[in-house]
Amino acid sequence: MPVSKDAIITLCRIIDSPTSSINGRNLEDYFGASGRSLIAMGALKTIVSRNDTESMSDHNGNSVDVVFHKGKNCYFSPTAGWVEVPANKIQLYGFCSD
């Protein structure tokens, strides 16, 4: 499978970050297709799931705790109630050299 220049640049930026990892939300928001291709080819693997996320509704983008509520990952919003957070948004991805 040929690797695009964008995918290589994305991988370099992730490896060069302070933690050499990226969460699913930022991977999708900032790198889109090149991030998805890195997961598909196995260059990025899930290393752990985070227990927090950024709330854009009423927490001004601040971090909020994600809890397991009624079988789903959610955080509580005073204005919206329980807000579901897709599992792929809180997964943390890191470089895999396999």
Image: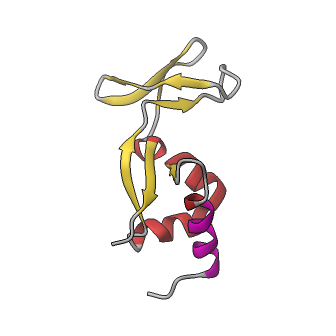
Q: Is residue 29 above or below residue 62?
A: below
Q: Write the residue at 48% across / 44% down.
A: 89
Measuring from the top left, give residue 24's x and y in whole percent: 50, 49
Furthest residue to the right?
60
Measuring from the top left, give residue 40's x and y in whole percent: 41, 70
Magenta stretch: residue 12 in it?
Answer: yes
Q: Write the residue at 61% across / 14% down.
A: 79
Which quadrant of the rendered structure holds the N terminus?
bottom left
Q: Nearer the viewer, residue 12 or 45?
A: 12
Q: Write the residue at 37% across / 50% down.
A: 47
Measuring from the top left, give residue 68's x and y in whole percent: 33, 25
Range of residues picked out in magenta: 5-13
Measuring from the top left, give residue 77's x and y in whole percent: 55, 17
Magenta stretch: residue 85 in it?
Answer: no
Left or right, 87 with respect to 21, comes to left
Q: Write the residue at 38% across / 40% down.
A: 49
Quadrant position of residue 70: top left
Q: Is residue 65 above or below residue 24?
A: above
Left or right, 19 with respect to 45, comes to right
Classified by dominant secondary structure, the portion drawn in magenta counts as: helix
